[in-house]
Amino acid sequence: MKRTTFAKTACAALAAALASAGCAPSNGGGDAGENPLADSVAAAAEAARFKPPEGGAGELHVYTWSDYFAPDVIETFEKELGCKVVIDTFDSNEAMYAKLKAGGTGYDIITPSSYQIALMAKEGMIRELDQDRIAAVKANFDTSFESQILDPSFRYSVPYAVTYTGFAYLKDKIPEGADVNSWSILGCEALKGKITLLDDIREVLGAGLLATGHDVNATDPAAIEEAVQQVLKWKPNVRKFDSESYKTEVASKATYVGQGYSTDVMQVIVGDEEAGVEPRDDVGFALPKEGFSVAFDEMVLASDAKNAGLAYAFMNYIYQGAVAKANMEYIGGPNPVKPGIDALDEDYREQIVLPAELLPKAKLLKALDDAAMDLYNKAWDRIKATGGTK
């Protein structure tokens, strides 16, 4: 999807939400060379110590979220290295993990959220990164994001994109007196049957925990029980749990309020010029004032990766300024790539990067141990089994 008017439109949308709630760095992303993306491929290959074999670099298999890399970013990487990037998608960390646990193989790069990575490492699903082959990552990482990631040492992962969880909503469908900048909107009876929640255990239980005044990573059984009871109070208003189609259902007015990710919602708001999809000024994005979850999706190297050299080249490519700029303008959220952020439109940059004063309300989802996850899984089973919404 090509979004040439993305920056200005997204700035206004996210501004409203935020208001209420070892080598030299590569070029900044657009001025050097006739094709900065092509130039970036060469720089990435060098940083990864990767030399494409004669006849092409083969296939790179990426398991990731939908609509997560700009098409021209992928196309240029393929063209310059004579390879094919094969993308498979998942809609939740749990679905991704379950597939791998059940024997799903054949991937080189996977992009789980940071809280899932420790478990994947423990299970032997991913390998430690060769620190000598991620030179561009280390050079271009924006250290202002360190407080929002779990492992700034890059032992197992390279941060890709940060998302904030809030609400996609139709501006003219919010009843008078209802506060869309609060988790309380989920209990509004006038919205019964017009609300969706993410089909994601951590996001939904996290919402219940934040709404009841607890830490988003709480492990105390009493706190988890309060969160369950809160979600069950919301559930009569919820038409379904969904992590994919909510993006289009808010736009089609089948849903009035959908719990969702900032990057997804921005894509709806700005439209798709190339596909003839108009911007949606009637759709908004809100962040709950009680607190909202923040998660970094990160690139990891699968333990059975067949094309590790090409995977390292791709990781370094994502950390080139021109590439990061293109991806940020495409997905509607920040990459922690300093030269890419510096190359963005100033107003857009100021809005997609969370202001320092809002950091206390951004609650980072962290890894839970086996005992805590057992509590969460049982709580999730109760939520999904109660009533008719699945």
Image: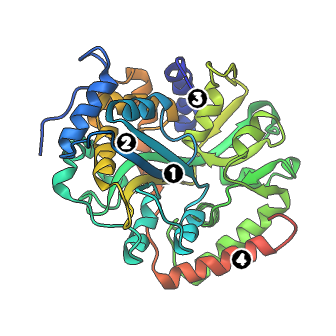
Disc with the residue nearer the chain's start (1 vs 2): 1
> Which residue is under mark 3?
13
Instruction: State which mark lies toward you, 1 or 4.
Output: 1
Q: Amino acid at mark 2?
A: Ala
Label 4 environment density (alpha carbons within 10 Å; few <14, some 14–19, many ≥20): few
Disc with the residue nearer the chain's start (2 vs 4): 2
Give coordinates of residue 156: x percent, y percent: 31, 63
**Labels 1 & 2 near each other (Cβ < 8 A):** no
Disc with the residue nearer the chain's start (1 vs 3): 3
> Which residue is under mark 4?
381
Q: Amino acid at mark 4?
A: Asp
Label 3 environment density (alpha carbons within 10 Å; few <14, some 14–19, many ≥20): many
Disc with the residue nearer the chain's start (3 vs 2): 3
Q: Amino acid at mark 1?
A: Thr
Q: What is the distance, in whole Å, between disc 3 and disc 2 at their CAs?
A: 19 Å
Give coordinates of residue 118: x percent, y percent: 39, 70
Label 1 environment density (alpha carbons within 10 Å; few <14, some 14–19, many ≥20): many
Circle on res. 64: 1
Q: Quadrant of residue 147?
A: bottom left
> Which residue is under mark 2?
356
Q: What is the distance, in whole Å, between disc 1 and disc 4 at their CAs?
A: 25 Å
Does 76 appear above or below 139?
Answer: above
Q: Quadrant of residue 44?
A: top left
Task: Give me the residue at 43% from left, 45% from top.
Answer: 161
Disc with the residue nearer the chain's start (1 vs 4): 1
Q: What is the distance, in whole Å, between disc 4 and disc 3 at their CAs?
A: 35 Å
Please state, as top left, top right, bottom left or bottom right, where the N terminus lies in the image. top right
Q: What is the distance, in whole Å, between disc 2 and disc 4 at their CAs?
A: 37 Å
